[in-house]
Amino acid sequence: QVQLVESGGGLVQAGESLRLSCAASIRTFSYLTMAWFGQAPGKEREYVAAINWSGGSTDYADSMKGRFTISRDNAKNTVSLQMENLKPEDTALYYCAGRPRSWSSLGAARMYDYWGQGTQVTVSS
């Protein structure tokens, strides 16, 4: 059974930073495309960023480009999201997601097989 566990969320002020982490309990982690999604109250789950199996390719939602950085450590089965210059509109429950190697339709939540429980990020103005 695949388990993804997020950590690192919290309450910060606008302009501050956070680093989210996701630990995966799967032997084939290095075969997975990994992504982060955010879901604000009353809204649909929204794509944030993705990273391919090797870490050599990354992709970001337009609103996150330049502020967020996704990375992975296959030796530790972890994927991270460094969030800089946070804004109140970044407030959401952030989920880690994974799927076997596919680098298409990255923003489609339905394409991901594995999900964590989420970690809350709240940004005050």
Image (cartoon, grey):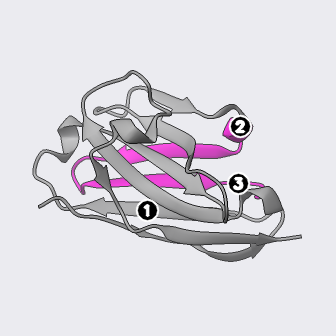
Residues rendered magenta in the picture: 63-86
User: What amino acid type should be assigned to the residue bearing mark 3?
Assistant: Glu
For the residues labelled 2 and 3, the Cα–Cα distance comes to: 9 Å
Q: Position of residue 5 (x, y in %)?
A: 33, 68
Tell me the residue that label 2 is attached to. 66
Residue at the location (39% across, 21% down)? 104
Tell me the residue that label 3 is attached to. 84
Q: Secondary structure at mark 1?
A: strand
Q: Is residue 22 left or right of residue 31?
A: right
Q: Is residue 84 above or below residue 16?
A: above
Q: 11 or 15, which is in the foreground?
A: 11
Q: Residues within 10 Å of mark 1 (few under 14, many from 20)?
A: many
Q: Secondary structure at mark 3?
A: loop
Q: Quadrant of residue 80?
A: bottom left
Is residue 70 one of those drawn in magenta? yes
User: What amino acid type should be assigned to the residue bearing mark 2?
Assistant: Gly
Q: Secondary structure at mark 2?
A: loop
Q: 37 or 10, which is in the foreground?
A: 37
